[in-house]
Image: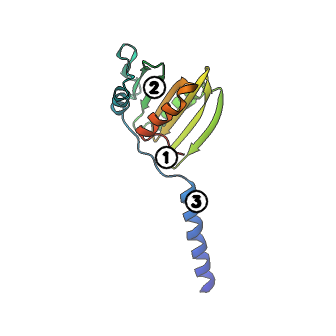
């Protein structure tokens, strides 16, 4: 009986540690929330913005901001395979990966590419991808945090 209790306590402890290390969950946002946040920041450029539905039904918004960021956000709904393919395509823009953070429903990759800072955040079947000058890295991180797409 004592051995069984010890193993049970050990198992519960190990599960607790694994859950804590696995990271929490992030909440996916919407295409509208991304555009609204960029407008709120005062960097929205309507002449270079787009909002479309892809042939697979995914929603996409993107463009270049007035301060030179290039952003795109995809919402693939329940289509995990298309989201996987989207991540694979976006990975081609990253020349150097500086850090990766993973949780139970998200992955955040930061790096460099095309002379600037790149962040790609996947939460469930949504993707936020931003390129900005290296000097704007902290502002991009704050933007992603405000959307709920960044954690360390």
Mark 1 vs 2: CB contact within 8 A: no
* Residue 63: quadrant of the picture: top left
Residue 58, horizontal then vertical, whole percent: 40, 29
Q: Which mark is residue 18?
A: 3
- Sequence-first disc among 1 and 3: 3
The one nearer the camera, 34 or 56, is 34
Q: Give the CA distance from mark 1 to mark 3.
A: 15 Å
**Image coordinates for residue 4, horizontal then vertical, percent:** 60, 81
Give the residue displayed 63% in from the left and 82% down from the top: 3
Marks 3 and 2, Cα distance to the nearest angstrom?
33 Å
Dots 1, 3 in contact, CB < 8 A: no
Residue 148: image tag = none
Residue at x 34% of width, y 33% of height: 33
In the picture, the quarter occupied by the N terminus is: bottom right
Quadrant position of residue 92: top right
Disc 1: CA contacts within 10 A as few (<14), some (14-19) or many (>=20) = some
Residue 98 makes an appearance in the image:
yes
Q: Quick check: marks 3 and 2 in contact, CB under 8 Å?
A: no
Res. 105 mark = 1
Q: Is residue 82 visible?
A: no
Which percent across, then down, holds residue 35? 36, 27
Residue 111, horizontal then vertical, whole percent: 61, 31
Cα distance in 3D space between marks 1 and 2: 20 Å
| Disc 2, SS | strand
**149 or 12: nearer the eye?**
149
Q: Residue furthest bottom?
A: 1
Of the image marks 3 and 2, the number of the one nearer the N terminus = 3
Disc number lying in front (1 or 2):
2
Q: Where is mark 2, residue-wise? A: 72
Q: Name the foreground residue: 109 vs 8.
A: 109
Q: Is residue 134 above or below residue 79?
A: above
The residue furthest top is: 47
């Amino acid at each position: 009986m004592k051995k069984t209790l010890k193993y049970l306590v050990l198992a519960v402890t190990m599960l607790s540690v694994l859950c804590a290390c696995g990271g929490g969950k992030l909440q996916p946002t919407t295409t509208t929330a991304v555009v609204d946040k960029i407008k709120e920041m005062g960097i929205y450029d309507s002449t270079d913005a787009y909002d479309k539905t892809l042939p697979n039904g995914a929603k996409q918004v993107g463009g270049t901001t007035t301060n030179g960021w290039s952003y795109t956000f995809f919402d693939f709904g329940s289509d995990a395979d298309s989201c996987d393919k989207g991540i694979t395509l976006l990975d081609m823009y990253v020349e150097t990966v500086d850090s990766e953070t993973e949780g139970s429903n998200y992955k955040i990759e930061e790096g460099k590419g095309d002379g600037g800072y790149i962040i790609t955040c996947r939460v469930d079947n949504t993707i936020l991808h931003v390129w900005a000058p290296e000097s704007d890295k902290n502002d991009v991180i704050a933007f992603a945090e405000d959307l709920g797409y960044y954690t360390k």
